[in-house]
Amino acid sequence: MISSLAPELRWSNRVRRREFIAFVCGAAVAWPLSLPAQNTGRFRRIGILFGGFSDTDPEPRARVEAFTRQLQQFGWIEGRNVKIDLRFGGGDDKRRGEYAEELIRIVPDVIVANAAPAVVVLARKTKTIPIVFTNVFDPVGSGLVESLARPGGNVTGFSNFAPEITGKWLELLTEIAPGVKRVCAMFDRANPPEFAQVAERLAPSFHLQYLPAPVSRVADIQDAIDAIARGSDGGLIVMGGTITSSNRQEIVQLARRYRVPAVYAYRYYVADGGLISYGVDPVDVFVGAARYVDHILKGAHPADLPVQLPTKFELVINLKTAKVLGLTTPPALLARADEVIE
């Protein structure tokens, strides 16, 4: 059984409303055909640590379900030859650290860690247990790996680092809300600043005044939205991060209340009432993580598995929220959307 500790881009042409632009890392990986998992008579153990989600949030559960389904394709069956231990940090630094230590004490064969804070705390505590990360902005700049092509240690995984996407966020904001003249970029203070730096550099080309808003607590979120809501020409870009993800409902509600058009990094913000999102599919990333876990369980070393950059992005629009904000979504934008929530 899965155990858990309680307390807590598709741009341009339309192809079945789905297409992608690939970002290729230094050494591309050709996924080898996986051999069936051998029954060695012992259980293999996999730890999963979510740093910013609680155990009651449906978002991480969808990722785990996709992960376990993919593992089954490789012959790893929960309860038969593998056991998965789940921990949810809930955005709490102390709890995240405690759960990291718990997982390490179990001595699993591999740990999957979602988002930089969870990966960093694990990487500090073990240099021997393989770690596969998901949704980390800048693994090289964060010191987690030596390079994308050759990670060099016990850590590898899947990055969502593609600063070019920031230009798409700005383009989307001005397309769906052409009256916006000021843009607030909200990002987790703990994350590397590349996205924010690209936004600052590109904003003038969209005739936008750039306002950075690094956040580390709920009060910072309130202050940032209060500031951009002073006037009718403010817009918001919410970048991914532990703080922004774990407080996404607060962000979405405040943006709606103050009628601030916002572009988000992930679909789940829009599912919770956000206006529009453009970013990677985290569930898809966990399918890739299952492939790397399979390789490791069959003898591969993280140092030999290149870090993967994002290959697919999705555009999601919430027409209900657009109506609340008094916005008319351009037909051309709707035609490019992968999903429209009505």
Image (cartoon, rainbow, N blue to C red):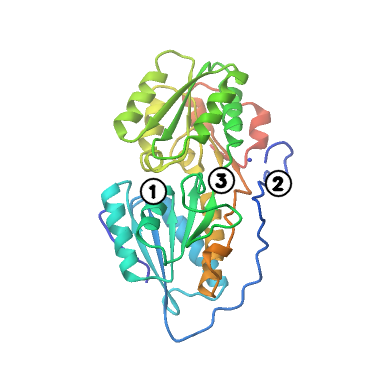
Mark yes or no: residue 328 visible: no
Q: Give me the disc on residue 36.
A: none
> Could you tell me residue 50's position as x and y percent?
39, 54
Instruction: Report the residue marked by disc 3.
Output: 280
Instruction: Classify residue 254 by image quadrant.
Output: top left
Q: Please name the residue that numbered disc 2 is placed on.
A: 16
Tell me if residue 234 can be seen.
yes
3 or 1: tag closer to the N-terminus: 1
Q: Residue at x 40, y 38 (%)?
A: 244
Residue 71: image x %, image y %? 52, 69
Q: Is residue 22 left or right of residue 96?
A: right
Q: Say which label, 1 or 2, has the lower sequence index.
A: 2
SS for dot 2: loop
For the N terminus, the image quarter is bottom left
Q: Nearer the viewer, mark 1 or mark 2?
A: 1
Q: Amino acid at mark 3?
A: Val
Residue 162 position in % (x across, y down): 58, 41
Q: CA distance from mark 1 to mark 2?
A: 37 Å
**Residue under pointer 1:** 117
Residue at 48% in and 85% down: 40
Crowd around label 3: few <14 · some 14–19 · many ≥20 (10 Å): many
Q: Position of residue 279 (x, y in %)?
A: 56, 41
